[in-house]
Amino acid sequence: MNIILQKLTFRNFKGFKEFTFSPKEEIAKVFGDNGRGKTTLYDGFSWCLFGKDSLGKTDFGMKPLDQFNEEIPKLENEVEAILKVGDKIIELKRVQSEKWVKPRGAKEAVFNGNTTDYFFNGVPVAKKEYEKRIETEIISEDIFRLITNLNEFNNMHWKKRRDVLFSIVGEISDQEVEMSNEDLNGFVKMLNGSSLEDFKKTIGAKIKKIKDEKKKIPVRIDEIDRSVIQAPEMSEEEINAEISMHQEVITATEDSIKDVNNRNAAVDGNIKQINKLKSDLMQFESNINFKYKTERDQIQRRLSTLQSNITESNKKIDRLNEQSKQHQSYIDTLANKTKDLRTKYGEVETRQFVEPDKNKMICNCCGQTLPSDNIEKTINDMKVKHQNNIDNELKEIKRQGINNNTQSETYVEEIKLNEVKIKEISGRVVEMKKEENHIKNLLEKPVVVITDFSEYAEHAAIESEINNIQKKISETEDTSALNGLIKENQQKIFDLKNLKEIYSTIEKSKSRKNELLSEEEVLSTELMKLEQQEFMCEEFMRSKVDMVEEKINSLFNFVRFKMFEKQVNGAVVETCKALVNTNGSLVPYEIANTAGKINAGIDIVNTLSRFYSITAPIFIDHNESITKLIHSESQLIGLYVSEEHKELTIK
């Protein structure tokens, strides 16, 4: 679908007071000196559709300025566009107006923001409907900027540019890359679903680990060679024979010790029996003395209980005395209050009514002097009220006096009750002190400890049994010499085994060295496989780079894209750089001349227009910088800087 700009009409927009732009359908040339409004054409076209200028800004100063460079107020800013969209003619109009409001109490109206009106084919519509119909019936804003602004695509972030290009050509599958290079046969199966980047990281980590392990192996072998111990003078067979001989001596000696221990066991049994009987004897003596000690402890506990009860009773007496003092204080306070009430009663009872001056009595409503009949009635009412107040006050004084007497009587009764309690507790304290003195006298007697148990038959029987067993005990045999002989032979066996361990250490060193050599061989084989896989990763990436760039660049005639970059360390990283054909050589878009950038932009817009199946007017700024434009499928509007054209001229 082709979009052709047929007409643009401006009213009070930037430098245009009234201006109509009617370009040709294929190529229109606009000439004008700097500042004459060439860019305003593109700004107005963009604002009419999307409410933004050609750079995508919503606040860009569209209002005309006066001679002092100030915005001219109370003007409507209007742009109307007539477009040919396919076979249809669509008329668009956007009008911005200022709101002026006169606040309450103010002399003049003040500016209160802007309002915008929208017209689609001459019919007023709401903002959302206007925007929706432009997007569905004409073009979306994102695509509009890509295919009307030659710099828009290259001003995007490189990742967004890359995404757009890949959306055009589609992703190249790993299978396609593998099929393009016979050296990559089986590589996709090797990936096993992993991304190339993850697979490379895994292989790199494995290679590093194997190389680190290989570096350690020669060091370990050297350590083994340096730690080899010289073989002993005795052979292993001679060492084993010596160990067997000493073991036989130990076995024979242990048999002798067993015989001695059997004989000593009977003696040990008698000793254990004597020790038990002595323990029984001590327990018997302890039980006899415990009886006397228990009785004395009970007396001591009774004394402690009495002393605690005496102390607590004295505390109760102190608390009751203190309480009685407080009650007496309350009684004295109530007596003083009653005395004051009697005085107040006499004052209230003798209070006289003071009759008001009849000449000064006036009506509360009208403020005039009251009639004589009303004066007498009012004075009588005042006398009655005066007497009622006296009666009520006397009644309240009597009530308070009765309440004070009642409280005072209650406190007197509580004082009497406390005196009874104090007398009762004091009597119990006297009795407890008598018992306390009696117990103290008992405890002053010395403690009885029995040491002579001759009168106890059970004690004599145990002593007799101990004497009888003692007579049966003979001396036990000493086995220390035999144990010393065993230790001596055990030490010799230990020394011989340490000597024998040297042969074991030598054998282990040889075995460990062979293991390390085998491990080194296995690591070398594994490293070779991993390095082959690493090479395949690099080859895969090179093939994919060539295929991607070839597929993308096949869509363009003038510009080329570099999609990958090789770094110093050999790694290939993603990018998206445009290269412009300048005099037969490719240079980065950023440093290309203006003519190269313009043709590169047209080439890119041609490809994007084919992909989106839509063309739209392209505004070419600085068109005077290029002598030959490449073919474009879109309507071209060239903006030429020309000093001789002081007004915009359309050709």
Image (cartoon, rainbow, N blue to C red):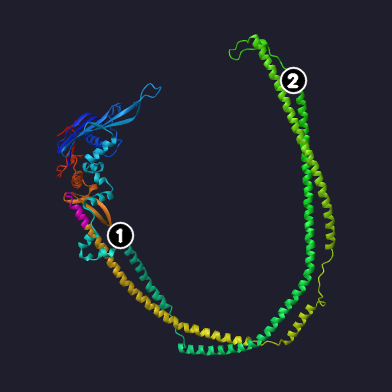
**Where is residue 116 drawn, in percent x and y?**
29, 32
Q: Residues within 10 Å of mark 2 (few under 14, many from 20)?
A: few
In this figure, which residue is indicated by the disc labeled 1?
A: 197
Q: Which mark is residue 451?
A: none
Can you see residue 70? no
Amino acid at the residue labelled 1: Glu
Residue 549 among those drawn in magenta: yes
Amino acid at the residue labelled 2: Arg
Magenta stretch in the rendered image:
547-558
The residue sitting at 47% across, 84% down in the picture is 500
In this figure, which residue is indicated by the disc labeled 2?
A: 351
- Give the quadrant of residue 80: top left
Labels 2 and 1: the sequence-earlier one: 1
The quadrant of the picture occupied by the C terminus is: top left
Nearest the viewer among 380 and 266 is 380
Nearest the viewer among 32 and 345 is 345
The residue sitting at 51% across, 88% down in the picture is 243
Nearest the viewer among 651 and 328 is 328
The quadrant of the picture occupied by the N terminus is: top left
**Where is residue 138 drawn, in percent x and y?**
21, 39
Up-down: is 136 above or below 204?
above
